Amino acid sequence: MATWSNFNLQNSASPLMEQIIFFHDHTLIILIMITILVSYLMINLFFNKYINRFLLEGQMIELIWTIIPTITLIFIALPSLRLLYLLDELNNPLITLKSIGHQWYWSYEYSDFNNIEFDSYMINYEKSNINNFRLLDVDNRIILPMNNQIRIMVTATDVIHSWTIPSLGVKIDANPGRLNQTNLFINRPGIFFGQCSEICGANHSFMPIMIESISIKNFINWINNYS
Ligand code: CUA
């Protein structure tokens, strides 16, 4: 989860998010190199005394400063496309979680297991007598098994919401009248937080998502004891 002074991306909890972080760092390095080069050239403009009365055109330099940015862009575009297609790939999901956005809470359905369904509301930190994560904790958590491919179906009932979990690399819009699909693979146990990221009304900031990642054995136990 996000903590104080966290300037970077959150730690990843899925292989895809790890790849997204690698891509972010890769792109940032290229950006820094470009910024340094351009800053150097611009600072130089103020101090140079090079004057050429007859300079009208320079085919070679124009060719160079066209080709080099093109190659630079390819180095960003190709890994970006690889990630884009990788994020959409679903291979044999073990279970399906359906999440439905409402104003202003999420509700979930585990349609594989005799249709377990529940609403997930944010806990009021000030009024709650148990210790919890302010503005991020919910009354009913999503329970999911780790190290398994999970299919997420996302929809909404009123306006557009967005089901977003930074540490898992998931961000998908919840549209009324449409069923969107994405996938998820959690590679460690823990609790992972997300928030709605489509401006959906007055309490947009108060519909957090909370995932509890547990072992498959405990997950089956939870399913069996669900009442
Ligand atoms: Cu739902 Cu913002």
Image: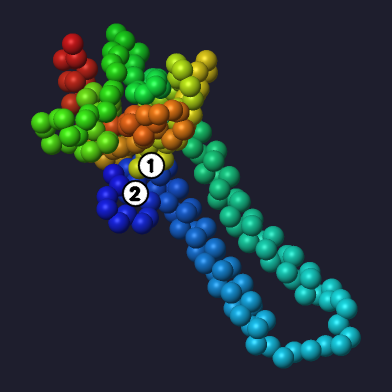
Label 2 beta carbon within 8 A of ligand 1: no
Q: Residue 220 bears which disc, if any? A: none
Residue 220 showing in the rendered view: yes
Q: Is residue 174 above or below residue 47?
A: above
Q: Which part of the image, by quadrant, shows the C terminus?
A: top left
Q: Residue 10 bears which disc, if any? A: 2
Residue closest to the far left: 129
Amino acid type shown at disc 2? Gln
Mark 2 packing: few (<14 Cα in 10 Å), some, or many (20+)? some
Q: Distance between the residues labelled 2 and 1?
A: 7 Å
Residue closest to the far bottom: 49
Q: Is residue 168 above or below residue 28?
A: above
**Residue 208 vs residue 215, the one in the foreground:** 208
Residue 92, how many percent across, how many down? 42, 25
Residue 87 shown left or right of residue 166 in the figure: right
Q: In this view, does 116 lie above or below 40?
A: above
Q: What element carries label 1?
A: helix
Q: Which residue is drawn at 34% across and 23% down?
A: 105
Residue 207 shown left or right of residue 200 in the figure: left
Amino acid type shown at disc 1? Pro
Residue 6, how many percent across, how many down? 32, 54
Residue 215, how many percent across, how many down? 22, 31
Q: Is residue 109 above or below residue 124?
A: above
Q: Which residue is drawn at 38% across and 42% down?
A: 166
Q: Name the residue under label 1.
A: 166
Q: Residue at x 22, y 29 (%)?
A: 123
Label 1 beta carbon within 8 A of ligand 1: no
Given contact means CB atoms under 8 Å apart, are the residues at marks 2 and 1 in contact? Answer: yes
Residue 13 shown left or right of residue 69 in the figure: left
Query: Can you tell which quarter of the image residue 114 is in?
Result: top left
